[in-house]
Amino acid sequence: MAAEEANAEAHQQMSKTALKLLSLVALALVATSCGYTLAGRGGTLPEHIRIIGIPQFTNRSPFPEIDRIVTERVAEEFRGRGRYRVLPDTNGVDAVLTGTILNAVPMPTSFTAGSRQASSYAMVVTLSVEFKDVKNDKVIWSNPSLTVREEYEVPTGAGTDPAAFFRQDSNAVERLARTLSKALATAIFEAM
């Protein structure tokens, strides 16, 4: 009986110690969190913003169609946030997201061993974007030089013109547009 009591007492002591340790860990997590949230899951827009206008981005880059694809992916990203209706214009909206693709530059990132031909590139896209609360006539977030980079491989025998390859490779354009749309939406939501 004494052994059982000692065992029960030891078990109770371990439970108290575990509970204290768990409480300390929880307290440490709460104390260090300081209100931060995971990227892309952060703040929300002001309550009155329900309808967001995302008109076609302006394209000043040498790559046709990149503006259409980027605009579509940005609109999808905002729709994916769940609470917002996205329209392709600026009429009847609570906020407007406008963008200009300033440039898109392919830069070689790796080369073949023998011929020193570029075997992969990074497409670097620079945009000027602004997110404005129309109801309060206030810019919520802007970045005149948002830069996004997406790497892609050049298939063997594709030639030496990365611009031609990029125009042909819709997967690379799609990846770039998705990367850009997530970065843009995260920046706007994190600004709140």
Image (spheres, rainbow, N blue to C red):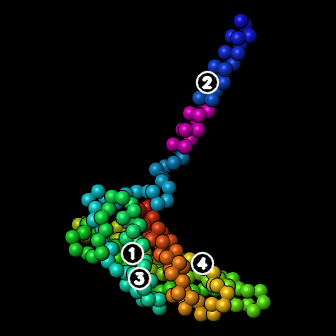
Looking at the image, residue 186 sits to the left or right of residue 132; the answer is: right
Residue at the spot of label 2: 16
Q: Earlier in the sequence, mark 3 or mark 2?
A: 2
Residue at 49 percent across and 76 percent down: it is 174
Identify the residue at horizontal 48%, vertical 53% (top origin): 36
Q: Position of residue 168 (x, y in %)?
A: 53, 87
* Element marked by disc 1: helix
Q: Which residue is mark 4?
A: 151
Please tell me which of labels 4 and 3 falls first in the chain.
3
Going from the N terminus, do you reach mark 1 or mark 2 first?
A: 2
Q: Is residue 58 left or right of residue 109?
A: left
Q: Horizontal and vertical percent for residue 100?
A: 39, 82
Amino acid of disc 4: Glu
Q: Which residue is mark 1?
A: 72
Marks 3/2: CA–CA distance: 61 Å
Give the residue number, with chain letter if any, for mark 3: 67
Residue flagged by tag 1: what amino acid is it? Glu
Q: CA distance from mark 4 to mark 3?
A: 19 Å
- The image quadrant that residue 157 belongs to is bottom right
State the extent of the magenta-drawn residues as a range. 20-30
Question: Residue type at mark 3?
Answer: Asp
* Classed neighbour count for the residue bearing mark 1: other residues with Cα under 10 Å, few (<14), some (14–19), many (≥20): some
